[in-house]
Amino acid sequence: MGFSALLVLGCIATLVFFLLSKGWPAWNTQLFFGNTNPLDAILGRAPLWEGIWSAFMGTLCLIAATMALVLLPGIGCGIFLAEYASPAWNKRLSTAIDLLAGAPSIVMGLFGFTLILFLRRTFLPEANTCLLLAAGCLSLLVTPVLVVNTREALEAVPRSIKLAASSLGFSKNQIVFRVALPMAVGGIVSGAILAMGRSAEDTAVIMLTGAVANAGLPSSLLAKFEALPFTIYYTMAHYQTQEELNLAFGAALLLLLLATVMVILAKGLELGHQYFWQGEVPSVLQ
Amino acid sequence: MLHDITVQFLRHNISVLVGRSGSGKTTLLRSINRLNEEFDGCTTKGQVYFSTGDKCHALYPDPDQHNLTHQKHDPLSLTKLRLQVGMLFQTPNVFPVSVYKNIALPLALVGHCPKAEVQERVRQALQLVGLWTEIQDSLHKSAHRLSGGQQQRLCLARALALRPEVLLLDEPTASLDVHASRHIEDLLISLAEKYTIIMVSHSLTQARRLGQKIMVCTQGEITHHLDKHEQLSTQELEALV
């Protein structure tokens, strides 16, 4: 068992070391903004032709759009499965969620592309691949993660607590939303972070639904966009100079950093919830 | 499974249900506040009447709308029933929030207590169970920091804060040590002057010590009703069980 843990840790350490050694030397303003002035680029005062800043902003917008589409339905479905669904509906929905979880991401991308073709031929001739379509397909991809994490977090709430709340006169909805859900926040946040991570890193879906090599900063939900995973893939597939290769490694390091920040943010949210809801000063702050 | 149960619980008394495991004591207790309905597959036939002196309420909805007997007794909603009938469980089940919130949350959500009164009601409830002096400086700390006995008293305070008329206690001292158990027992004796207490106990000694009325449950029926003045010894009681 110890050897397995060491093996996993070793792989992670190798990956991080590899990315740091290759990507860190490439980190400079040129990597992010090319020849454009950084402040002008950030404020949108000047167009951005080079660098990975557009891809970084595109990724952030993609995560935000995906989470906006998936958070409520995903958590809501998880709550329904855990607390309200009859056994028959539970079985049907769980099967559907499992099927969705098993769908390959390239198939999801193909679905999105086919949807656009259908819309162009029927209701929306101007329809095109865009940020919204990519976010929609990614939201389908990450829904099972959110649903399952929410359901499991709620099912982990001790029965005795729910029974105690019942005996005090709490209604079903009060038990779910005022007692069980606050207790399940940790699990739900973990699910949301996993979902965010997946939507930040998936390439196959966005390749077919709106990501391009050069689109500048994201201008709207209905426009093409750049994203870090696609930039890495495209650069690695077509690089001709060492600088281009370094750009890819720099982008990979940035993506890893983004994932790390999301995990830290999740931990912070969990600790904050622990403090304000449970009245317990988290041990890391004692 | 319970059957052929007809029993009266007197006001401002401690009635104790004793019997072997699986004899139906807890099921009978839970039928009073309809908590059996939280368990899948449970059905209840018959009726439980709850008399507050001036009014008599039927606790279970009667499927027969034309039942004149039922119509004489105002049906009591589930929330109102559970406000008037508090419950304490075998294992302390404090909410994973602060001591203060454990009591304030039900007061606000179910008791509809005005915000200005919540603090005072929390203090009164904690004083009633003898916890106030012990934890008044750590009300906003997690309830899980309390000892088992303190947690059980907090659960009692939480129920008492809603000002019930009846207290249902399902082996309230089963998970506590001797000293904590004694503390709870003394508390129950003092509370019996104001509340109607119905408790389940596995300890015949405790039942003799606390119960003004002891009911022996056997295989889903109440086979013996004993008054305190009958003064059965523990061995005689054990023979009945």
Image (cartoon, helix red, strand yellow):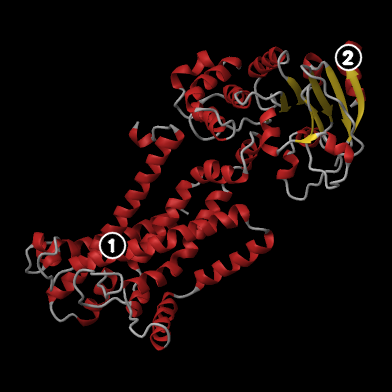
Q: In which quarter of the image is the C terminus of chain A?
A: top left
Q: Visible in this render: residue A214?
A: yes
Are the residues flagged by discs 2 and 1 in contact, CB closer than 8 Å? Answer: no
Q: Which of A131 and A23 is in front in this view?
A: A131
Question: Which residue is label 1 attached to?
Answer: A60
Give amino acid for label 1. Leu
Q: Nearer the viewer, residue A27 or A202?
A: A202
Question: Which residue is label 2 attached to?
Answer: B233
Residue sitting at x 13%, y 78%: A241
The tally of labels here is 2
The Cα–Cα distance between marks 2 and 1, rounded to whole angstroms, is 76 Å
Residue A243: x and y in percent read: 12, 73
**As drawn, which residue projects farthest toward the bottom?**
A121
Residue A98: x and y in percent read: 55, 68
Mark 2 residue crowding within 10 angstroms, few (<14) / some (14–19) / many (20+)? few
Secondary structure found at label 1 = helix
Residue A112: x and y in percent read: 41, 78
Residue sitting at x 75%, y 21%: B196
Left or right: A204 with respect to A47? right
Q: Which of B189 and A229 is in front in this view?
A: B189
Left or right: A203 with respect to B204? left
Residue A168 position by quadrant: top right
Give amino acid for label 2. Ser
